[in-house]
Image: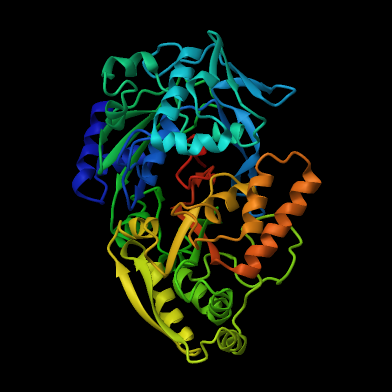
Amino acid sequence: MNRRDFLASMAALTASTTLPAKWAIAQSRADSLRVLSEGAANSFDTISIGVNRNSIQVTWNVYDRLVTFAYKPREDGTPYYDYFDIQGELAESYEVAENKKSITFHLRKDAVFHDGSPVTAEDVKWSLDRVVASPVGKAQFQTGSMTDPNQFVVVDAHTIRVDLPQPDRFALPNLALTYPIIVNSKLAKQHATESDPFAMEWLKNNAAGGGAFKIEKAAMGERIIFARFDEWKGGALPKIKRVLWQTVPAAESRIASLVRKDADIVQDIPPKDVVALLKNPDVKVIGVPTSSFQFIGMNGDIAPFNDVRVRQAIAYALPYDNMFKAALFGRGQPLFGGQPGEPSTTKFPQPLGYSTDIEKAKALLTEAGLADGFSTTFSYELSVATIAEPIALLLQESLGKIGIKIEIQKVPAGQLGTLLQEKKVPFYFEGSTSYLADPDYFFRIFYYGDTRWNFGSYKNPEFAKLVEKTRYETDSATYDADIKRMITLVKQDIPIILLWHPALDTGMQKDVEGYSYAFHRQLELKTLSRA
């Protein structure tokens, strides 16, 4: 099959999930894959306003970063990103200054962009300047004390230094996240304007990278063809040479394609379908508990959720096991149950010590002066209805046993975030994720401040002081003691009720190997191969 025939067969897939005969021939080759997912990328840039999670599947594979997280095997052998092992990607090496106030990166001298132009420290500086010029990028980078372009210093053509105002353990992992892609500045500048000096608009629809894959052809919202970049120097050259990523919104169509062997990898599989696929001996499913978490939110600024006894009563009344089975079919890692009181570990999220106990819940409501219960709403967004609806119905039934009357409100897709930002929702189901694994970072994002991410509007003065205290703490014993105290407080005050880490389930043909779980939950194409 020549290249023209291959691309023609790709184009034929736009209107159908059934593969034409020509693609079936190409698919038998050891170096090609076809991937189906529910959603599509809406940008080729990580820091576009409104960029969606699917876009990471493009930028992660098409661009390099200075550094990246290594992988280590889980108990089942699946490689999982290692937050505490950061290795060079575009940088062949780096060193942290003795005073921990700068990091110097030495670039690979033979690295080139997809157009063949060399990668220089000027490209890296321009790319990092671009991150702090973007509201999206700067919001993340400031968690690593990087806010000013003057902090990114070109030492020579292949050396760049990042200066920090104080030692910050979040600086280096921030550089391994999705945002700081290294852009071909020479190419991008050709499309910059006075009002858009970093070519943000052009980069939404055009790639200018030097990563392991390049975009060979794309129809935004429908399909993208990735081709291996044979001059890539950031690691071992991928074994897969070409990937077709197609958007197929209907789960049943994606799964049917997998079973028919028309697709090699299928993403976004609903939990109920995973159960059926696990019984099919002709395909395999890899399920990995994710770093994301789902929870029940209670707005502590709205009565009666401003009473800790009411929040505790609800936490004791929830039917956790039934919700876990009905919503996720058990596909995930529970964050309910566990032991109350002081924690034995500093890892967070962790189970908060609440299990179903209706009598204890009734007693707490009585203590709060609400022996007869109260009425409230419970909201969830329609975009997650498959999971949220059974949770809402079971919650409604169980809270009814302690006198709490629930009116379920289904919020149109895309609107719950705005309502949470405005702090208008008293009681709801939601999910989020933390890119950085340090517990104080998690607490700072989700239990502190006036942002929408402080889902419970939590305002404990002792906790707030500890959030500030742990930010730059360097003594590990002091840090651990403070974190354990913070965990004790959130277990006691229960501003949100953690439910579980949902599993990321990916279906694939049995001859597909090398699947690795990355923190952003999108495919790492570099590690994939065929048996």
Expressed as whole percent of the image width and height from the top left, the position of residue 330 reads 53, 70
Q: Nearer the viewer, residue 285 or 304?
A: 304
At 26% across and 51% down in the image, what residue appears?
17
Residue sitting at 39 percent across and 36 percent down?
135
Q: Is residue 313 left or right of residue 253?
A: right
Q: How is the image coloured?
A: rainbow
Q: Is residue 256 visible?
A: yes
Residue reaching furthest to the right:
477
Residue 176 in picture, x, y percent from top left = 55, 33
* Residue drawn at the location 49% of the way across and 51% of the way down: 510
Out of 311 and 500, give the one closest to the viewer: 311
Q: Quadrant of residue 60?
A: top left
On-image quarter of the N terminus: top left
Q: Nearer the viewer, residue 225 or 408?
A: 408
Q: Horizontal and vertical percent for residue 333? A: 58, 63
Q: How many badges with numbers are in the image?
A: 0
Locate residue 409, reporting x and y percent. Answer: 32, 73
Residue for point 40% across, 69% down? 388
Q: Name the image quarter holding residue 493.
A: bottom right
Q: Residue furthest top?
A: 156
In the rendered image, is residue 290 in sight?
A: no
**Looking at the picture, does residue 119 appear above or below residue 362?**
above
Left or right, 254 with respect to 363, comes to left
Is 145 left, or right, of 27 in this rendering?
right
